[in-house]
Each structure stands twice: as C-alpha cells, then as structure tokens.
C-alpha cells in the first residue's frame, strides 16, 4: 500500500511554473510503479447542502475569481462524510477485501494516516486527523476535479445558456450545473454541448440545418 499519488493539484496554481511542472513530471517518473497499481476508495457527498460562492474580483478576464467553497458548512454533509468513511473503512478491513488485495489488514488509524499523508489537497492538516473523523473529512476533502456551478442557469445565464444582460454570448459548460452529475462529468458536459449546438442550429436554420 502506498499513498504516493503525485497530484499536480497539490502544487498551488500560481506556483505551476514551467520549472515546477518539469520537476513534478520528473518526480512522478520516480514514483514506484506499484503506486499506480492500487486505487482510492472515496466516499462521495452527493448533492451537498453546503453552498459556497464565486465572485469576480474585477472585469479582467485574466484574473481568477474569488471562490469560497464552504465545504461541510452544513452539519449533515459532515455527518454523511463521517458515515461514508466508517463504511469504507469497514469494507477495506473486511476479510473479503484483504483476500482480494492480498494486503495485511490495516488498523483504522493506519488507513486514515495513509490518506492524510497522500496530501490530496492544499488544506493544512491537523494532528487529530486520525482521531476525529470530522476533522479527517474536513482536511482530506476534494472535488476529484469535478468543479462546477460558477455560472448557474437563472443567475448568470438563462435557460438557453445565454449570458444575462450580454448579447451574442453563451456559456455551455459544467459551470452552469447546479449539481454535479452522479458520475464523472465529462460525458454529460459533452452531451450538453452537442444538445445545445443542435438546438441552436435547428432554431437558426430550421429544416435546412439538416439536424
Ligand atoms: C485532472 C483532472 C482529471 C479529470 N478526470 C476526469 C475523468 O476521468 N472523467 C471525467 O468525466 N471528467 C474528468 N475530469 C473533469 C472534466 O475534465 C471536467 O468536468 C470537464 O472538462 C468540464 O468541462 P467544461 O467544458 O465545463 O470546462 P473546461 O474543460 O474547464 O473548459 C472551460 C474552458 O473555458 C476556458 N475559459 C476559462 N475562462 C475563460 C475566459 N474568461 N474566456 C474564455 N475562455 C475561458 C478555459 O480555458 C477552458 O478551455 C477531470 C478533470 C481534471 C482537472
């Protein structure tokens, strides 16, 4: 078992210089191949109650907006995470699982420690991460790169994905989702792009659009 996953996401965005990316790629090559023969079991808090916000800091498109995630600000989300971690731990420690992986049964503390050390995000870690599942959830939370919702339908775009108050501009991507799809989002995003593309063609060209 190893926790060396070498994610680029653990390098803060503004420090991702060409040199930093080259160093990252070199280090990744040095990670033993066994590291990639394992896997992660995650617990997903789907359709969370907690909400955050995204605000433009100015009108310069080059500048990143200010984003506040507010993960686990709603207590039921935290409770669902804790229950999920308890279930995952039970599965990973089960005889069926260790028979399959042919790994020794690790204690709960070892399993939690391994994840904390994997350093999946930039959140500062706490000494009680393996004692408090609430703290563990807060410190190891990730979106698995499935960010969405910075440009909601009804708030930034209308139901035709036209940007409110702006002519001839649409946003058709994952930023318009209120909820993340139940699984990896790329297929849904692509289907939505195709759906909206065809709809626009039909509206503009009617039967001559050939679609
Ligand atoms: C490391 C990683 C692994 C992933 N793995 C998977 C996976 O295995 N399966 C899966 O389904 N999904 C995966 N995803 C998620 C998936 O890539 C995204 O959900 C998907 O790309 C979202 O598509 P999008 O069109 O909404 O946004 P994006 O693909 O991010 O496209 C947004 C585009 O807008 C452009 N843009 C931003 N700001 C401006 C601006 N001001 N003006 C003009 N253009 C702008 C950006 O340059 C970008 O091209 C992964 C994501 C990451 C980061």
Image (spheres, rainbow, N blue to C red):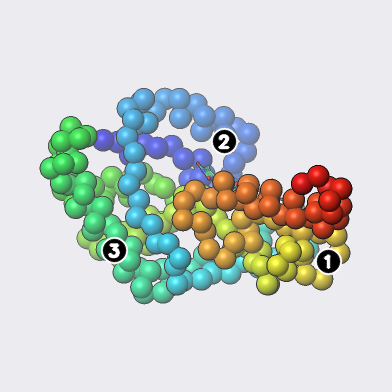
Mark 2 or mark 1: which comes first in sequence? 2
Asked where in the image residue 135 lies, by quadrant, the reply is: bottom left
For discs 2 and 1, the disc positioned in front in the rendered view: 1
Q: On the image, which quarter does residue 169 sit in? A: bottom right
| Residue 110 place in picture, x, y as percent | 21, 47
On screen, residue 109 versus residue 41, left or right, reads: left
Image quadrant occupied by the N terminus: top left
Q: Secondary structure at mark 3?
A: helix
Pointer 1 residue: 166
User: Residue at the location (41% across, 47% down)?
Assistant: 120
Q: Nearer the viewer's eye, disc 2 or disc 3?
A: 3
Label 3: how many Cα within 10 Å (few below 14, some 14–19, many 20+)? many
**Is residue 154 shown to the viewer in this render?**
yes
Q: Could you classify mark 1 by the number of other residues whose Cα lies within 10 Å: few (under 14), some (14-19), or many (20 or more)?
A: few
Question: Residue beneath label 3, please?
Answer: 82
Report helix, strand or loop for mark 2: helix
Mark number, residue 20: 2
């Amino acid at each position: 078992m190893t926790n060396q996953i070498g994610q680029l996401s653990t390098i803060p965005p503004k420090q991702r210089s060409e040199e930093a990316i080259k160093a990252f790629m070199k280090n990744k090559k040095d990670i033993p191949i066994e590291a990639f023969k394992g896997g992660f079991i995650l617990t997903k808090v789907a359709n969370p109650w907690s909400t955050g916000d995204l605000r433009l800091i100015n009108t310069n498109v080059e500048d990143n907006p200010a984003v506040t995630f507010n993960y686990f600000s709603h207590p039921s989300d935290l409770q669902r995470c804790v229950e999920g971690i308890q279930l995952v731990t039970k599965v990973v420690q089960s005889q069926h699982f260790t028979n399959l992986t042919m790994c020794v049964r690790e204690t709960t503390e070892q399993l939690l420690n391994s994840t904390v050390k994997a350093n999946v995000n930039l959140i500062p870690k706490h000494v009680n991460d393996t004692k408090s599942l609430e703290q563990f959830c807060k410190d190891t939370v990730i979106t698995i790169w499935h960010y969405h919702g910075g440009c909601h339908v009804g708030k930034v775009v209308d139901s035709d994905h036209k940007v409110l108050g702006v002519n001839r501009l649409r946003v058709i991507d994952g930023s318009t989702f209120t909820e993340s799809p139940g699984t990896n989002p790329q297929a849904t995003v692509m289907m939505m792009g195709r759906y909206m593309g065809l709809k626009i063609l039909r509206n503009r060209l009617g039967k001559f659009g050939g679609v």
